[in-house]
Image (spheres, helix red, strand yellow):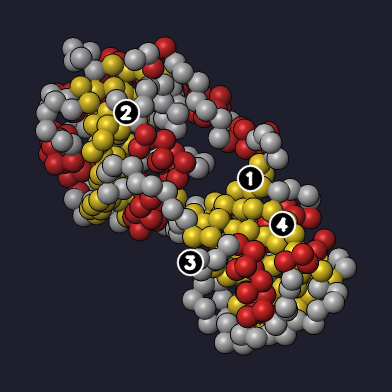
Amino acid sequence: MGSSSTDAYWDSMADRFDEEPDHGLREPAVREAWAARLREWLPAVPADVLDLGCGTGSLARLAAEQGHRVTAVDRSPRMAALARAKLAGTEARVLLGDAAEPPVAEGRFDVVLVRHLLWALPDPVAVLRRWTGLLRRGGRLVLVEGRWGEAEPVGIRAAELAAMVRPFAEHTEVEQLAHDTALWGRPVHDERYVAVVRSGPPRRHTEIVDVHLVLRRGDEVLLGRRVDTGYADGLLHAPSGHVEDGEDVLTALIREAREEVGVVLRPEEVSVALVMQHRAPGGRERIGWFFVADGGAHEPVNREPDKCSELGWFPLHALPDDMVAYCRAGLEAYRAGERFVLHLHDPGDAIAHDPAGPDRAVVLADGACSTMAATKYAEPSRREDDTP
């Protein structure tokens, strides 16, 4: 659904939005239940609270009534108009804008409050990183989320959300909310929760470095099937391993080639194929160096049968589907002549390549970002509201 059709949809829903008990908070018991929760989740009054995807402004109104300085944002003009009407008489302000890239400056808020929205955004990890950047040091995200529906459930499980925020959270508290019928105005049977994510001082970014051998024999490439490793077992993968302390990447590649497949390579036989930053579903980012070598003069053998059930040669132009997704994406990028690639899974993605699943590969062109990367990672333009 495009942005204009999304706006039109929420505009059409706006006049009926408050009919849901937890949206309109018209019932006194429901309203008081949410007010009590906000007093628990928000810091001491007064705090600067940013309510993203505010809808008709019900939670923003509660926060303002409790004495907080509230900025509310919604992309639907009709929702924003109703929120302004609901917040009349308070000092809260309502802005029209995209919650994923709100029209506000960084480092200005004590709280970013979001309810039932993150699950619907296309790149939730990137959005969470953006939202964290809006916080002052020691600020917090208050994320009310869940997983709704039985036949075709949508949403984000609490464990998945906790994994998403781990890289930039000092402390995360998750509280299940489905049992509290006062919040919803009726019994509910799906997962509903709040995650209060407290940010800490920025931590220096560190990553594991791994190396991958693209051993070629004509148009074929060597792959091994993982077994009993605890990760991606049963899937095909190029010979690979971690760089050990004190090693450079070339030394590590030569060592891993010898240890895993019995191939003794000289440094002059190896060239860099590509560099990839990759992340497993729910994992941390890593830097992967892919090196290519001619396998015609070498006969590989399975030196680690406890970790690899078989070795085989596969056509590079028609790689099998039962591969680790990032490795397959790396080989496809190499075949296409690319040199720098991002492949960052979201929690919930499959480890295995899925032809029908989301394509997480983003190619970074040598010297300048590609169109795809530039679109995805473009610096947000400054808005009038960003003026210091």
Helix, strand or loop at label 3? It is: loop
* Residue occupying the point 69% across, 53% down: 274
Residue flagged by tag 1: what amino acid is it? Answer: Val
What percent of the width, then of the height, locates residue 146? 35, 50
Going by the image, does 152 lie left or right of 68? right
Residue flagged by tag 2: what amino acid is it? Answer: Gly
Q: Between disc 3 and disc 2, whose residue precedes?
A: 2
Task: Give the distance between the C-alpha atoms of the residues marked 4 and 1, in whole angstroms.
Answer: 19 Å
* Residue occupying the point 60% across, 48% down: 342
Task: Give the distance between the C-alpha atoms of the residues marked 3 and 2, in whole angstroms.
Answer: 37 Å
In the picture of the structure, the residue carrying the numbered disc 3 is 245
Q: Quadrant of the N terminus?
A: top right
What percent of the width, then of the height, locates residue 237? 65, 70
In the picture of the structure, the residue carrying the numbered disc 4 is 272
In the picture of the structure, the residue carrying the numbered disc 1 is 362
Q: Residues within 10 Å of mark 2 (few under 14, many from 20)?
A: some
In the picture of the structure, the residue carrying the numbered disc 2 is 107
Q: In the rendered image of this protein, does residue 329 appear above or below residue 10?
A: below
Q: In the rendered image of this protein, does residue 2 appear above or below residue 337?
A: above
Which of the 4 quarters of the picture holds residue 182? Answer: top left
Helix, strand or loop at label 4? It is: strand
Q: Residues within 10 Å of mark 3 (few under 14, many from 20)?
A: few
Q: Quadrant of the C terminus?
A: top left
Nearer to us of marks 4 and 2 is 4
Task: Give the distance between the C-alpha atoms of the residues marked 2 and 1, in whole angstroms.
Answer: 28 Å
